[in-house]
């Protein structure tokens, strides 16, 4: 007999019951919708976009996965998002895209009638095949789930997201979460660094009539200069 894969087991656990399938089919109430937040540019702009475009009666539920160190409460207060933050002890390994790890999140969403969960992921991450940031990953997660799983920015470039942060939503980039530390020789780290670097190189603010600078890149250069001066 063929041994079941992790994906097969996860699928059986999450969608095996007729009751859960019925929840998905009968969903008419779209009030509760969750968004995964990291405090970084992509997830913050995603949150602003959802607040702007979803119906006014939508209950946007902030979701934090793993050990997120950035305090996202200030932006929630600014957007008047009242739902409490839902935290899940799900280890986010940038080299691992095993969708079955999201089962606790999916089970919570089913129990609380959450219609959709939005994930931050951009076009450049999809093009670089960053684990957990691809069309394939979100399709597998959607198949596994009893709720709608979507990544609205997966066709949007990093450059455009940065421009919207500044020109459309007046977000102070220096107040967002710092990017992951660059580790030379690690392919994923190098890819993420390149995506951010190229995004800022191309991002021009029409409103301010100048190129948008990465505030954390400036800080790192300043730190290097200080070290040289010692």
Image: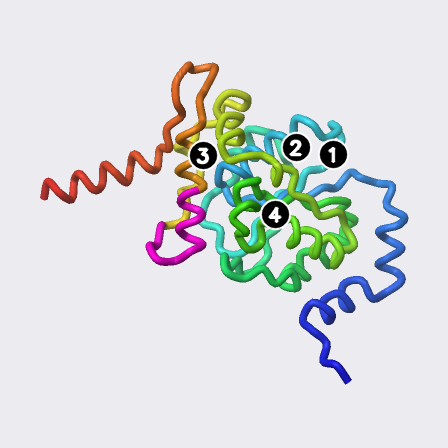
- State the residue position of label 4: 63
- Report the mark closest to the observer, 1 or 2: 2
Q: Residue at x 64, y 60 (%)?
A: 99
Q: Earlier in the sequence, mark 3 or mark 4?
A: 4
Question: Of the residues under marks 2 and 3, which one precedes in the sequence?
Answer: 2
In the rendered structure, which segment of residues is drawn in magenta? 182-194
Marks 1 and 2: CB-CB under 8 Å? yes
Residue 1 at x, y percent in the picture: 77, 85
Q: Main secondary structure of the magenta part?
A: helix
Classify 10 Å Cα crowding around label 4: few (below 14), some (14-19), many (20 and above). some
The residue labelled by disc 2 is: 50
* Circle number at residue 199: 3
Nearest the eye: 185 or 107: 185
Q: Which residue appears at 50% of the width and 57% of the height?
A: 94
Q: Which mark is residue 58?
A: 1
C-alpha span from label 4 to label 2 = 14 Å
């Amino acid at each position: 007999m063929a041994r079941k894969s992790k994906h097969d087991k996860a699928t059986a656990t999450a969608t095996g019951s007729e009751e859960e399938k019925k929840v998905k089919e009968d969903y008419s109430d779209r009030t509760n919708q969750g968004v995964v937040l990291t405090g970084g540019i992509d997830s913050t702009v995603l949150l602003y976009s959802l607040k702007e475009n979803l119906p006014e009666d939508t209950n946007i539920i902030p979701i934090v996965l793993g050990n997120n160190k950035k305090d996202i409460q200030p932006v929630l207060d600014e957007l008047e998002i009242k739902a409490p933050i839902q935290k899940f002890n799900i280890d986010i390994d940038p080299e691992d895209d095993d969708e079955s790890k999201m089962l606790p999140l999916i089970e919570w969403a089913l129990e609380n009638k959450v219609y959709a969960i939005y994930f931050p992921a951009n076009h450049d991450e999809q093009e670089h095949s960053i684990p957990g940031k691809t069309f394939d990953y979100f399709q597998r997660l959607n198949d596994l789930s009893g709720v709608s799983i979507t990544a609205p920015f997966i066709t949007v470039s990093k450059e455009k997201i940065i421009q919207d942060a500044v020109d459309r939503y007046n977000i102070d980039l220096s107040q967002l979460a710092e990017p992951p530390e660059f580790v030379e020789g690690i392919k994923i780290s190098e890819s993420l660094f390149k995506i951010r670097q190229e995004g800022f190189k191309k991002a021009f603010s029409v409103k301010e009539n100048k190129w948008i600078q990465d505030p954390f890149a400036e800080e790192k250069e300043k730190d290097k200069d200080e070290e040289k001066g010692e």
